[in-house]
Image (spheres, grey):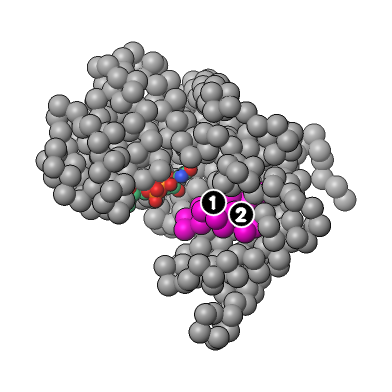
Amino acid sequence: MSFEKNVYAVSLQHEIAMKVESENPFEAMMARFKVASDILELDSGMFEFLSTPARVHITAVPVVMDSGELKVFEGIRVIHSDTMGPGKGGIRFAPDVHVDEVKALAAWMTWKCAVVSVPFGGAKGGVRCDPSKMSPGELERLTRRYTANLIDVFGPDRDIPAPDMNTNEQIMAWIVDTYSMHMRRTETAVVTGKPIVLGGSQGRVEATGRGVMTCTLAGMEKLGLRPNQATVAIQGFGNVGSVTAKLLQMQGCKIVAVSDVSGGYYNENGLDIEAMIAYSKNNRNSLAGYPEATSIDNETLLTLDVDILVPAAKENQITVPVAEKVKAKIIVEGANGPTVAHADKILHDKGIMVIPDILANAGGVTVSYFEWVQDRQGYFWSKERVNRRLDRKMEEAFHDVYQTASKYDISLRIGAYVMAIDKVARALRLRGIYA
Ligand code: NAD
């Protein structure tokens, strides 16, 4: 039995032992974390340390609603690790925010930051609420009170939030203002993903898609695929999907299919991405009714006969049955957790290169790091400089993950985890355990 198969056997046994439901992001992450820690032969103490969040904050967030009624929401902030630096990770507002999921997402950020070598630990936060039913005023009061409750947690040297699901630049601006009022000085470096006028960075909006593009080109090079010979299908046409589509098309790739919640759009001669972006913008962010394409459903898009598949919509899209039918040579995970853990082995056995989320979509956190650096320097870079430095960091990260995967003869996903966990574990050993 080859070493690779051994690794998967360990993973499978572990999954069976834990009765892992691969749909649960925490368990999906832990299944991969466990495989990587076995390869690194982490001792049980280190394993426990690295899988336990450093701090979990749960706080009641009272808000006087527009009606005059008082409502109390649950606010969460988890710092998984601060071994490498301050916590870093988004804040989401959603009705299903739960502390277990936030813990998993925080750990994910630790590994993602380590993969691209930015000096941050991992964190994540959220408020359980339904923002679609809240007015701007209610959202502002919720954001400010959540920030005030966590005033000793947040800070440019402690924990730096960013936007995530249903949070945006405006919410980051309210956090900056609330934090600054308490500190008695303006402190823009407390969050990233801010409006440019308030210390945001050039290139932040395109950063994740740009990183996906860089990883795609790096993966293609390894397989000897030339951009102008490559066909691409992209699931999701939001921030990540549309920017990836545009940039890959600019590199010469033929984008034959894209999708959004309204369905999939296929054109074997290549889609006009600029036209689709404009169409979607004028159609309330929907491609519904786009004329220059044939309609296809979601599963068809994922299993098209293309060279590159970019899932850039949401988690758990490449399930076991989908994985069995995928024909792409490379999957580049623009979304977080688009592949269920049980599908990893199937894709690996089929010889499909999977560029994992913690590498492929780390362009966003990389430019967040650049934003924080610029705020602290008080000196702002041109878009060209941001893009150049982002490209370099993503290329280096791809190279490092590829080397690690080759060294241990494992997939890029497990390679990325091995590299990240090894970095944090080595830093921790050097720091030692303070007693
Ligand atoms: P977004 O809300 O801008 O876009 C999501 C897109 O997916 C939309 O076009 C939506 O219509 C589409 N979609 C939703 N359900 C779908 C389905 N079932 N089939 C096809 N399309 C569907 O979100 P985004 O910022 O582009 O994020 C997409 C993914 O990338 C998420 O997993 C997110 O966590 C991850 N991610 C985003 C960033 C970032 O900087 N925006 C960074 C890292 C990871």
What range is drawn magenta here? Answer: 160-175
Q: Position of residue 153 (x, y in %)?
A: 73, 58
The crowding category of the residue bearing disc 2, from other C-alpha atoms within 10 Å (few below 14, some 14 to 19, many at least 20), is many
The crowding category of the residue bearing disc 1, from other C-alpha atoms within 10 Å (few below 14, some 14 to 19, many at least 20), is some
Amino acid beneath label 2: Ala
Q: Residue 290 falls in which quadrant of the image?
A: top left
> What residue does disc 2 label?
173
**Quarter of the image that includes the N terminus:** top left
Query: Do labels 1 and 2 touch, CB within 8 Å?
Result: yes
Name the residue located 53 percent from the left edge and 23 percent from the top edge: 384
Q: Is residue 194 visible?
A: yes
Amino acid beneath label 1: Glu
Depth check, front residue: 30 or 108: 108
Depth check, front residue: 52 or 90: 90
Give above or below for 3 relative to 260.
Answer: above
- Asked if residue 267 lies left or right of residue 255, the reply is left
> What residue does disc 1 label?
169
Q: Is residue 124 visible?
A: no
